Image: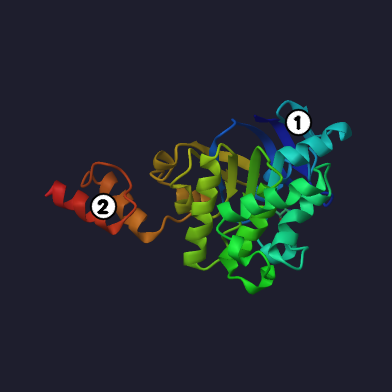
């Protein structure tokens, strides 16, 4: 469990970026954190693997407090992080070197590294490219290389901070499917995004606003919240927004629909 209590974070310039956050994330959950730019999402998730430390309050990862120096290595191993720009995370000349890099800095015996890397590359459908440079791949595949480098360390939690925001729509779907697949393997996911539709497959959607948790609940319930755009700067994609209006007007019965086909079916049923 990641356990956060009355967490405040004040940057050196005086900005209060997190304002009394209470949050528990259970093992196995798929949590999406959404919110407009500057709402505090990155600041919050950086506390989850001790990249930032509390100004006050506490963050505990599996019971280990992030402020204790002795816990740092353990916490960093338990919670992996993937960021927006995969290119800034590459360190190896080839994909397999890149993915092996983190392991080479641990106690894992040298002969065990290659099979671990091979396994992850197969799972991520990157094995055939293992001798290529990460830079020769598409944006989505590059992001999957960065994800592989974290996955190979066998973390229990992975934080994805806006990993889809620089990707084209096809690559975005590919990376989202990968994240879902990783969650199905039992790894806890904390996925930060400003696109609400990326919470469709999540167990839980948290909306942040001005350094606070504004909403926390099941995605299909939060999608129906009337003030998402006006208060929290979050827009549903057109199809979901249309179905929300139709649902609120009592024209369709099942809440937000996710595809044109589903909407047509719902409308036909309502006639
Ligand atoms: N290193 C920093 N120094 C000072 N202020 C910062 C720093 N990083 C972020 N902030 C401020 O903290 C607030 C939250 O930022 P951030 O956590 O990056 O939000 P988000 O990820 O939701 O866009 C913003 O007002 C931002 O300008
Ligand atoms: Mg951010």
Other-residue count near label 1 (Cα within 10 Å), few / some / many at <14 / 14–19 / ≥20: some
Q: Quadrant of residue 218?
A: top left
Question: Which residue is farthest top?
Answer: 63
Tell me which label, 2 or 1, sits earlier in the chain.
1
**Residue position for label 2:** 262
**Residue position for label 1:** 58
In percent of width and height, residue 260 lies at 28, 58
Q: Quadrant of residue 50?
A: top right
- Looking at the image, can residue 55 be seen? no
Question: Which residue is farthest right?
Answer: 69
Name the element at disc 2. Answer: helix
Say which of 73 and 125 sits in front. 125
* Left/right of residue 159 with respect to residue 243 in the rendered view: right
Question: Which residue is farthest front?
Answer: 111
Question: Which residue is farthest bottom?
Answer: 136
Disc assigned to residue 109 = none
Q: Quadrant of residue 133?
A: bottom right
How many numbered dots are placed on residues in this image?
A: 2
């Amino acid at each position: 469990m990641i356990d956060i209590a009355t967490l405040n974070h004040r940057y050196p310039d005086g900005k209060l970026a997190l304002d009394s956050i209470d949050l528990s994330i259970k093992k196995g959950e798929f949590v999406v954190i959404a919110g407009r730019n500057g709402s505090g999402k990155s600041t919050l998730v950086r506390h989850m693997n001790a990249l930032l430390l509390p100004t006050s309050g506490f963050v505990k990862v599996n019971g280990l407090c992030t402020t204790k120096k002795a816990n740092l290595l353990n916490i960093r191993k338990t919670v992996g992080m993937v960021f927006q720009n995969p290119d800034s995370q590459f360190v190896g000349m080839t994909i397999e070197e890149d993915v092996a890099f983190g392991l080479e800095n641990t106690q894992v015996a040298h002969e065990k590294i290659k099979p671990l890397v091979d396994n992850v590359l197969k799972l991520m459908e990157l094995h055939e490219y293992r001798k290529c440079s990460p830079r020769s791949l598409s944006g989505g595949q590059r992001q999957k290389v960065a994800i592989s480098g974290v996955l190979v360390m066998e973390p229990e939690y992975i934080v994805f901070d806006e990993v889809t925001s620089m990707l084209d729509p096809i690559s975005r779907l590919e990376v989202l499917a990968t994240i879902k697949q990783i969650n199905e393997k039992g790894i806890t996911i904390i996925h930060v995004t400003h696109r609400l539709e990326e919470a469709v497959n999540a167990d839980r959607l948290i909306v942040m606003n001005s350094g606070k948790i504004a909403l926390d609940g099941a995605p299909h319930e939060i999608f129906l919240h009337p003030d998402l755009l006006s208060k929290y700067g979050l827009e549903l994609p057109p199809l979901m927004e249309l179905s929300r209006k139709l649902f609120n007007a009592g024209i369709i019965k099942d809440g937000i629909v996710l595809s044109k086909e589903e909407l047509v079916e719902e409308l036909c049923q309502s006639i």
